[in-house]
Image (cartoon, rainbow, N blue to C red):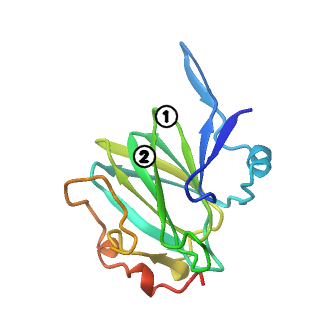
Amino acid sequence: MPFEFKKLKIKDVILVIPKVFEDERGFFLEGYKKSEFIKNGINAEFNQDNHSKSVKGVLRGLHYQAPPMGQAKLVRCIQGEIMDVAVDIRHSSPTFGQWVSEILSSENKHMLFIPEGFAHGFIVLSDTAEIHYKASNEYSKEHDRGILWNDSDINVDWNIDYPPILSEKDKIQPLLKNIKDYL
């Protein structure tokens, strides 16, 4: 089997650990195999790939897209190291407002599957990091949304002792209690 699929504390968020074949030439892994993902409960159809690069201390998030353009994501750090975070924003969910995080790095090659109905963010822990992720829907400016990264009702432990580097947009996102997109 080319992957191990581990359900996290919020069972809809899945850590995907690819089987890595390494030798003196380097390594090979399968980054995505539709049949294996479907067999393990990930039925998202990915329609867009994104790639970003950030420096240490950059915090991107917490982002999501509102229905009908909600996005499931498959996130992988291909250079450096990040702490990746998923927050359940589905009001009807028993885990509403809860979050999970995983360290994703070029070294561990792990991926995080984040279903639709979750806000997503990450903080860069290494000097630089490059993130590649698949999204189930294309970007829609009209449906682009976010939640304040340090909302005290969510209380994400970003595990940092310095102020993060934020975009102007991320400094003024609304609080979770004020969003109504996933009732």
- Which residue is drawn at the image coordinates 39% and 39% (left, top)? 80
Please provide percent x and percent y for residue 68: 66, 80
Q: Nearer the viewer, mark 2 or mark 1?
A: 1
| First in residue order: circle 2 vs circle 1 | 1
Q: In the rendered image, which quarter contains the N terminus? A: top right
Residue found at the very far front of the displayed protein: 94
Nearer the observer, 55 or 117: 117
Please provide percent x and percent y for residue 174: 38, 82
Amino acid type, residue under disc 1 in the picture: Asn
The residue that disc 2 covers is 130
Please provide percent x and percent y for residue 50: 53, 56
Under circle 1, the secondary element is: loop
The residue that disc 1 covers is 108
Nearer the observer, 112 or 167: 112
The Cα–Cα distance between marks 2 and 1, rounded to whole angstroms, is 14 Å
Under circle 2, the secondary element is: strand
- Which residue is drawn at the image coordinates 30% and 49% (left, top)? 55
Amino acid type, residue under disc 2 in the picture: Glu
Q: In the rendered image, which quarter contains the C terminus? A: bottom right
Residue found at the very far top of the displayed protein: 24
Up the image or down, 3 lies above or below 168; here it is above
User: Is 177 left, or right, of 20 in this rendering?
Assistant: left
